[in-house]
Amino acid sequence: MHLVLSDASVLPISAELSFEASDPYTVRIAFTGAHSTSTWLIGRELIAHGLLSDSSAPAGTGDVRIWRDEDPSYLLVALSGVEGDALLAGPAESFVRFLNATVSVVPFGNESARMEDEISALIVSLLDA
């Protein structure tokens, strides 16, 4: 991926996406640049919506917004955090392949079945508190 700077220059960064079936709503993305690493938890569904969005109506309204670039072969990810804002650009096809791999593990719509045990344990711990 690339970090897009305010002057439109770009810096290369790596982005490592990971998915756990035990947390099926979330994708963890570790962005690593020359001098820092930042890890974000992003909704899997938000990424899917972003692949279908454009700049006129990006997916997301808060700290994370995602959309296809004018060149649809690129996906843009805008992040806002306490340390500032970042705009990242990467090949959309990599995100498509990643999402397809997650869907083979936990199809969209089947996430809650994976969370049943965790939710039950949370309820029990809250009632015992």
Image (tube, helix red, strand yellow):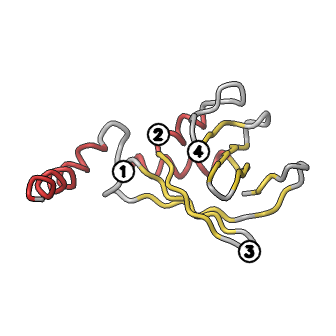
Write down the residue under mark 1: 24
38 sits left or right of 120 in the view: right
Write down the residue under mark 4: 63
Amino acid on which the number 1 mark rests in the picture: Pro
Write down the residue under mark 3: 35
102 sits left or right of 73 in the view: left
Residue 38 in percent (x, y) is at 61, 65
Q: CA distance from mark 2 to mark 1?
A: 10 Å
Write down the residue under mark 2: 45
Q: Secondary structure at mark 1?
A: loop
Q: Residue furthest front?
A: 129
- Residue at 68% across / 65% down in the picture? 14
Label pair 3/4, CB-CB below 8 angstroms: no
Q: Earlier in the sequence, mark 1 or mark 3?
A: 1
Q: Earlier in the sequence, mark 2 or mark 1?
A: 1
The correct choice, above or below, for 34 with respect to 16 in the image is below
